[in-house]
Each structure stands twice: as structure tokens, then as C-alpha cells.
Amino acid sequence: MKLLDKFTATTAIRDALQRDGVSPTAIVIDQILSPTEALINGRRTLLVGTNNYLGLTFDPDCIEAGRTALTRSGTGTTGSRMANGTYLEHCLLEQELAAFFGYPHGMVFSTGYAANLGCLAALLGPGDAVLLDGDAHASLYDGCRMTGAEIYRFKHNDADSLRKRMRRLGAQANRTLIVVEGLYSVLGDIAPLADFASVRDEFGACLFVDEAHSFGVFGNKGGGLAEQLGLLDRVDFIVGTFSKSLGSIGGFCVSRHDELPLFRYASRPYIFTASPCPSVIATTRAALRQIGARPQLRTQLWRNAQRLHEGLTAQGFTLGAAASPVIAVRMGERDAALHFWQRLLAAGVYTNLMLPPATPDGGSLVRCSVTAAHTDAQIDTVLQAFRAAAAQSVTATS
Ligand code: PMP
């Protein structure tokens, strides 16, 4: 087999997705109009699959902060912090993130993916053991794998399964890392974080929580699930992304441990990549201020989540979890999901199609994510589009 022959299988996957019309992997947004609308294929389309939870991508303060930084500090840093130097604003954002959680330390990465790789690379090495939730994001899995640590996956969101695995580790248990998320982005379900913290305490392990989808979404201040549950002093490392509630791009880790700043010397995904550019840092800082100052964004987000969840439940759809800003609709077979997703798009509603193996239990999903910027009328349009697409499914199969 020649090197490029392996792409024959990839071509077949791509062609299967394109076979019956618009492919979910080939969507081009001609123009983004607002946090909730875009032009797609020349049509004004309602966006319900952006993870733009607080709708801050068009916030005037964030845009102005980015514009000012662009003019003042240029388009990019052109290199990594270790080699080319840290900008003062990187440090300020790190301090502001740490202060947001009431922790002493913060560290900024170029993406959330890099934050996970970077922190896990610093924490783990050959001979260490990591206990990873069965549905953990690819970046957590990849991060664990690249360290050479022994990976033990426990049953998703199951503290008993974690405890059992921990027991089997015997004396090694008190030097393990437990890796979980807050809000899971495929089904929209939420980690039993207090139970995981109890296992952590019981065995003297460390707890690492990826709050990519929960930062800005949970907590009085918007700090995430650990903040909401009062667990900030029983979690060891919190990582997150700038690409969801904060509306930009980048990642972070915050911690109460004085070892966090040492990650800078032990983390290749931090050392060998360019640092976030000035405009990104500035918009992120502005968004962080908004999250702190405008709790009403979170109230509106949850109101919208409830409205969509209730509406879809009333229509008889089977949903992935209780109401949260991620609402996954179970579609059964792969083709049924693809066609349903295409019908929604044809009706001017953009959602996310999730197919196995990217789904936890092998089923296919049409996933929505709501934002604080959606209006009631927009949520009702989404509900109407689901109703119409379901009616078409019935016609198509009868
Ligand atoms: N962690 C989780 C749980 C995620 O869902 C994602 C991205 N969707 C990431 C990390 C990576 O974040 P980023 O897109 O900033 O690389």
C-alpha cells in the first residue's frame, strides 16, 4: 500500500456525507451577521450550533478592545513566549483569570486544545497513572496519550466506576490525576463533580476539570461548574477555552497550586507555539469583564435553554440530557440524522450533526447549542423547523 492509499477510505466517508445533498463537513459561512445569524449558501440562516454561549462575539466593548489592541500592538506576536517574549497583556489576562476564580495562578495558551495538551504534558509522564472519563474530549485523550502515562478510562460520569478503578491502583492511587469535564458538549450532560471531588479526597489524588463548555455558563460569577458547586478548593486544575463563552480563541489553566507557573518550563505545547495575538488577548479580557459584570447574560442563556428543551420535549423528541445550553436530539440511524440535519438547514436553521464514532453511545445526533443572544422568536423558529423536519421524515418513510 502506498502512503496516500489510506485516503481511499477517507474519500468514501466524505462521499457518503455528500451523497444526499449538503455535507455537514463542507458548510461555508459566506458571511457571519451576528451571534445568531449568518448567510449560508446565500440564505439568511439562524445559528443554533455555535457554542457562542453568551453571544459576546459582536459585543461592542469586545470589538473596540480588539480594534484598539490591533492598532496599538500590531497583528501578531510572531512567536512563542519563551523565545520571543511575553507581552504585558498576556500577564494581565493570566492575573485576571486567576483572580476570577480566586486562585493565585493562571496560564494562557494559544487554544483550548493546546491548554489541555500543555497541562497534561506538564503533569504526567511515563510511570504515572491518569483516570480519564470515558467520554472526555479528544484533546484530553490526546494529551494523556502523548505523556506516556498509563490511561485508565472509567465509566462516563460514574464516581463508583472511578472509585473502583482507583482502588485497583493500590498504593499508586495517591499520585494519580483524575480528568473530567464540567458540561459535556455532545449530549449536554453535567459531571457529578462533588462525587468526583469526594473520590479525589478519599485517595489523595489530583482533580483536573475541563470547563470549556461550562465557563461562563455555570456559577454566580460565571466561573463554571466547580464554582457553582462550591468546589473550587477541592479541584486542583481548571482548564478552559476562550472559544466559547469568551467569544475569541485561546485557552487557559488556573490553579491554587504553586506548581502551575512551572508548567511553562515543562510543556511543549506551551513552549513551541506562537502566543495569542494582542487583539485576541484584548477581546478576551473585555469578554471576561462582561462575564463578571453581566450575570443577566447567564440568566437569559438558561431561559433560552429551558425554552428550547421544553419545546423539543413537548414535540416528542428524545433529548440527550436535562436542559442545558447544549441540547442534543437523538436521531437513531446515521442517514436519518443526516437527512434531518439537511432539512433543518434547508429551512434556514443551522445545527450540528454528530455521527458515530464521535458520539458516546453509537447513536446519531442533531445537536443544538443556545446562546444568550437568541430571542424567543428565534427559539420558536427553531422549534417550528424541527416540527416541519419531523413531519417530512414521517412523509419520507410512509
Ligand atoms: N475541551 C473541550 C471539552 C472542548 O469541547 C474543546 C473544543 N470544542 C476543547 C477543549 C478545545 O478548545 P479549543 O477549541 O479552544 O481548542
Image (spheres, rainbow, N blue to C red):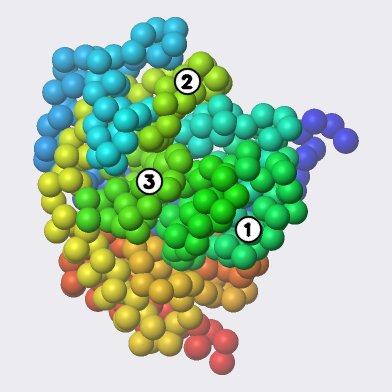
Give the residue number, with chain letter if any, for mark 1: 162
Give the crowd class for mark 3: few <14, some 14-19, many >=20 residues within 10 Å: few
Q: Are marks 2 and 3 in contact (CB under 8 Å)?
A: no
Amino acid at dot 3: Asp
Marking on residue 233: 3
How far across and down, in percent of the image, does residue 17 sit? 60, 58
Q: In this rendering, which labeled residue sits more in front, label 3 or label 1?
A: 3
- Is 344 or 261 nearer to us in this picture? 261
Residue at 54% in and 75% down: 331
Residue at 69% in and 60% down: 164
| Left/right of residue 220 with respect to residue 268 in the rendered view | left
- Is 22 or 197 nearer to us in this picture? 197
Earlier sequence position, callout 2 versus callout 3: 3
Earlier sequence position, callout 3 versus callout 1: 1
How far across and down, in percent of the image, does residue 168 sit? 75, 54
Secondary structure beneath label 1: helix
Secondary structure beneath label 3: loop
| Left/right of residue 221 with respect to residue 139 in the rendered view | left
Query: Image height check: is 243 above or below 124?
Result: below
Q: In this rendering, which labeled residue sits more in front, label 2 or label 3?
A: 3
Residue 362 occupies quadrant: bottom right
How far across and down, in percent of the image, does residue 127 sit? 73, 32
Q: Quadrant of the C terminus?
A: bottom right
Amino acid at dot 2: Leu
Quote the CA–CA distance across marks 2 and 3: 20 Å
Amino acid at dot 1: Leu
Give the crowd class for mark 1: few <14, some 14-19, many >=20 residues within 10 Å: many
Earlier sequence position, callout 1 versus callout 2: 1
Q: Is mark 1 within 8 Å of ligand 1?
A: no
Give the residue number, with chain letter if any, for mark 2: 262
Query: Image height check: is 101 above or below 352?
Result: above
